[in-house]
Image: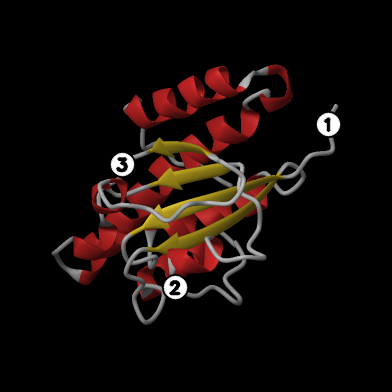
Amino acid sequence: MSDKIYNTLFLCTGNSARSIMAEVLLNHLGRDRFRAYSAGSHPGAQVNPLTLEVLQSTRLQVEGLCSKSWDEFARPGAPQLDFVITLCDSAAGEVCPVWPGQPITAHWGFEDPSAFEGTAQEKREFFDKIFRQIANRIKIFNSLPLTKLDRVAIKRELDALGDRVMQTSTIAP
């Protein structure tokens, strides 16, 4: 068994909802295998309050979370990345910085909960739905036998995760 910790960066345009959820989930579920980060191409001023509410409702850590620029991860001294995963179609279509470490990249598209319009309860339910979808993919990602797969096979598995229609059953992290 390998002691390698895989550095994973999750990207969204605003870094206020989906990428934050993915960062927290992978750091929680994959704490022995992964170190997750998140960033955005045009980060907002703060993490969406509904993101924090959803994370807190599942007893996940929210302390220290903030929206940050993806430029922080392309600078000298940034963590060497193993994986870079975009979670929104806007970020997937942008020209990304050159990431240190030649990471494997993938796109896992999710609807933007921050853009959802409805009542306060409907918004909360939509955030919960997206959280469960992200949790499903993170659980599968965390279970991949990375030490037994070559780079091409890992890329294929990550791309397949992006292509899957994930169920939105209740997931307890």
Q: Give the mark nearer the N terminus: 2 vs 1.
A: 1
> Label 1: how many residues lie within 10 Å, few (<14), some (14-19) or many (20+)?
few
CA gap, disc 2 and disc 3:
19 Å
Residue at 39% x, 65% y: name it.
Answer: 15
- Dot 2 falls on a residue whose secondary structure is loop
Above/below status of 135 relative to 58: above
Q: Nearer the viewer, residue 16 or 100?
A: 100
Circle 2 residue: 67
Residue at 47% x, 20% y: name it.
Answer: 156
Asked if labels 1 and 2 touch by Cβ distance under 8 angstroms, the answer is no
Q: Give the mark nearer the N terminus: 2 vs 3.
A: 2
Amino acid type, residue under disc 2 in the picture: Ser
Placement of the N terminus among the 4 image quadrants: top right
Q: Nearer the viewer, residue 81 or 98?
A: 98
Does 45 sit left or right of 24 as displayed? left
Circle 1 residue: 2
Circle 3 residue: 109
Amino acid type, residue under disc 3 in the picture: Gly
Q: Residue furthest bottom?
A: 45
